[in-house]
Amino acid sequence: MRTEHDPNAILVIKHGALGDIIQGLDAFASLRDGNPKSHIAIMTTPAFSSLFAQMPWFDEVITDPRASALNLAETLRIRTVLRRSWHCIIDMQCSRRTARYYQFYVPRQTRWIGTAKNCSDPLPDFTGVNNRDRMLFAAKCAGGTDSLANLDWLTHPTDAPENKTTQSPKGQFVVFVAGCSPHRPEKRWPAKNFADVGRVLSRQGYKIVMVGTAADADIIKQVETYFPEAQNLCGQTNLSQLTRLFASADFVLGNDTGPIFLAAKSGTPTLVLMGSATVPEAMRPIEKNAGWIHHATIESITPKQVVAKLQAMLQNQR
């Protein structure tokens, strides 16, 4: 445990979302590899605190509910955290909120790596730069190295018994990630299209598995309406089980949403479908096993195009 005056302590701020956090794994590993003896803390939202607690790169997880400034108790708590004797603070969120943190809470002598106005280490213009590379650059500013994170800490949990069984079907199977954030419906490929692809793949000998959270239940039910042969695991997998399921699959197909980045990171061929809400160069998974199809509107991507792309990706993997 660090003391309040640990000269090597580093604070990373990364509130979310899941896809961004997965894209940041290489940066987190890089920071730890370059600072093996430092106390490294992460500030994140309560929704992701347990995920960060599993990671091997952090010594401390600090929750930030992003409360209103009128919530004096939370405001004072976050202010106290930010005024600790940090060697440096790395802002990997780079939001208006974190800029306000720097402006109002952080002592001016504290080294701040980010985009806040007048900070000590301003990051360059990252327009068009992939999120993974942006966060890795920030980590390197604090002594990080060129590192690639693995998912062993997530795929081989040692505590919760429910993590020990992955619900993977026997034989060849494909995982569909048909949902996405409820407030981003423009990122959803139509349910009927997923079903059409599922029928083609089924004729080729693949089983279809659908995953998601409770927020994805509606569109997964729609896919089932068109293609009842698909196995519905919506709401039945935690992140460890989901990662193992992805790693066991022949390939993964999905929208631009958090779990699709986890699929790509698992090493399985992963195809991401993108519309106008996504800029591929900045937001796509960067893994070599990941591909994408990008159209002005996601609805204009046809099942035929998706099947052809999947087949081409599988051919390249052989």
Image: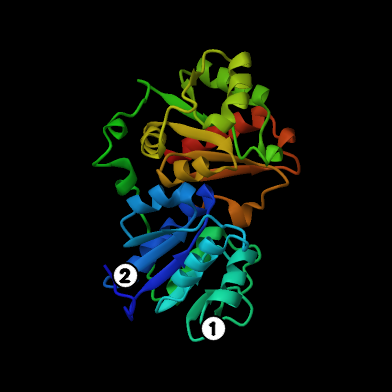
Q: Is residue 123 visible?
A: no
Contact flag, marks 1 and 2 (Cβ < 8 Å): no
What residue is drawn where x is 46% and y is 21%? 206
Quarter location, residue 225: top right
* Mark 1 or mark 2: whose residue is earlier in sequence: 2
In the picture, residue 140 is in which quadrant?
A: bottom left
Please tell me which residue lies in front, 292 or 144. 144
**Circle number at residue 315:** none
Residue drawn at x 58%, y 30% is: 216
Q: Is residue 203 above or below residue 53?
A: above
Residue that appears at 52% across and 55% down: 65
Where is residue 131? Give x, y as percent.
Answer: 55, 59
Residue 205 appears in the figure? yes
Residue 177 lies, in percent from the top left, at: 54, 33
Name the amino acid type tagged 2.
His
Quarter containing the C terminus: top left
Q: CA distance from mark 1 to mark 2?
A: 21 Å
| Disc 1 secondary structure class | loop
Quadrant of the image containing the N terminus: bottom left
Q: Position of residue 67 (x, y in %)?
A: 58, 57
Q: Position of residue 210 (x, y in %)?
A: 51, 26
Q: Mark number for residue 120?
A: 1
